[in-house]
Amino acid sequence: MVNLLAIGLGGALGSIGRYAISLAAARLSPGNFPLGTFTVNLLGCLLIGLLWGLFERIHISHEFRLFLFVGFLGGFTTFSTFGRETVQLFKTGQMLPGLTYMIASNTAGLLLVGAGFWLAQRLIKG
């Protein structure tokens, strides 16, 4: 139960942080570039790398790891988790799985967003 509470609280805070940063970035963004999402994704990647590096040297509890990595950063952006997993594959010498994961995630993700949109349009017309 403590694990679920840690994840839930972290997720709520991460989601609020994502929303706040997206609003602030939208005010600064000229045109249609999604600066908020871009900023949050890159900041999430920096944070997960920084925390990952720190916590390889500094011990923290399992619950606090869940709060930060699964909860907060998961609510903030899952792009950071994708980045960490990809780097972990490269770090352990698994170049082919790392490249496959990177290319397949981006390609399939974009295709599935398009497919979902197309499907929704067909269902609404139907």
Image: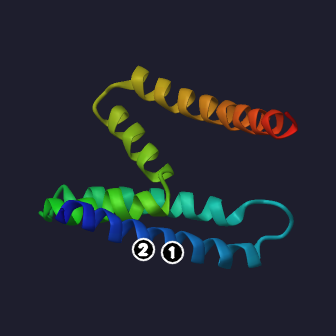
Picture disc at residue 13: 2
Crowding at dot 1, Cα within 10 Å, few <14 / some 14-19 / many 20+, comes out as: some
In terms of image quadrants, where is residue 87?
A: top left
Q: Is residue 111 above or below residue 46?
A: above
Tell me the element at label 1. helix
Is there any visible trace of residue 80 in the rendered image? yes
Tell me the element at label 2. helix
Residue 64 placement, left or right of 17? left
Residue positioned 41% across, 61% down in the render: 73
Disc 2 versus disc 1: distance between alpha carbons?
Answer: 5 Å
Residue pointed to by mark 1? 16
Do the residues bearing badges 2 and 1 touch, measured as CB atoms within 8 Å? yes
Residue positioned 21% across, 61% down in the render: 3
> Which residue type carries mark 1?
Ile
Across and down, in percent, residue 101 comes to 47, 29
Is there any visible trace of residue 54 in the rendered image? no
Q: Is residue 109 above or below residue 43?
A: above
Q: How is the image coloured?
A: rainbow
Residues 124 and 89: in front is 124
Q: Is residue 108 above or below residue 84?
A: above
Query: In the image as oriented, which residue stretches furthest toward the front?
Result: 126
Quadrant of the drawing holding the C terminus: top right
